[in-house]
Amino acid sequence: MAGFEPATARLRIECSTTEPHRQQTVVNHSTLHSNMIEPNSRTKTSKKLDPQTYARLKAEASAPYRGLRRFFYLAVAGSGFIGAFIFLTKILAGRDIETALSNLAIQATVIAVAAFLWRWEQRQEEKEKKNKKS
């Protein structure tokens, strides 16, 4: 192949100059250490967390994403209620009763599971509150 030059050959030519590649720099360690920021454990903060924020953060640490889980329980239960309403109206209208009954059973199960998880979450929160008080 005439005129083909590999990239490594071009790099070899460009890097083969007589100039020094890097200058060595002298680092003064005493000025470097004095310019460094001290770690958080040594620094004192003038602002403290107010008790409400601290309690909220502590609750979030003990049960992460509790609010998000409750939102999903509500969303799933709402979806189950909408589906159950639709399949119940199909049954009442007498259209495709066999599949509508099975789908209604599925929607009822979804509602029951969401209600169980919601109640379980509430019980866990009540247990945590009781343990905190004692």
Image: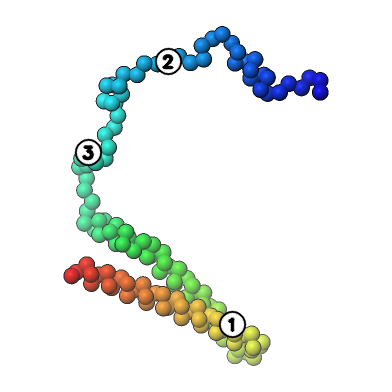
To which residue does mark 2 refer? 24
To which residue does mark 3 refer? 42
Residue 104, image x, y percentages: 56, 84
Circle 2 packing at 10 Å, graded few (<14), some (14-19), many (20+), is few
Q: Is residue 125 left or right of residue 1?
A: left
**SS for callout 2:** loop
Q: Is residue 63 left or right of residue 109?
A: left
Q: Please report whichever mark, 1 or 2, sits nearer to the chain's N-terminal start.
A: 2
Residue 59, image x, y percentages: 29, 62
Circle 1 packing at 10 Å, graded few (<14), some (14-19), many (20+), is some
Residue at 24 percent across and 41 percent down: it is 41
**SS for callout 3:** loop
Does 5 sit above or below residue 46? Answer: above
Circle 3 packing at 10 Å, graded few (<14), some (14-19), many (20+), is few
Q: Which mark is residue 103?
A: 1
* Residue type beneath disc 3: Arg
Residue 117, image x, y percentages: 41, 75
* Residue type beneath disc 2: Gln
Residue 83 in sight here = yes
**SS for callout 1:** helix
Closest to the observer: 96 or 10?
Answer: 10
Q: Is residue 26 left or right of residue 91?
A: left
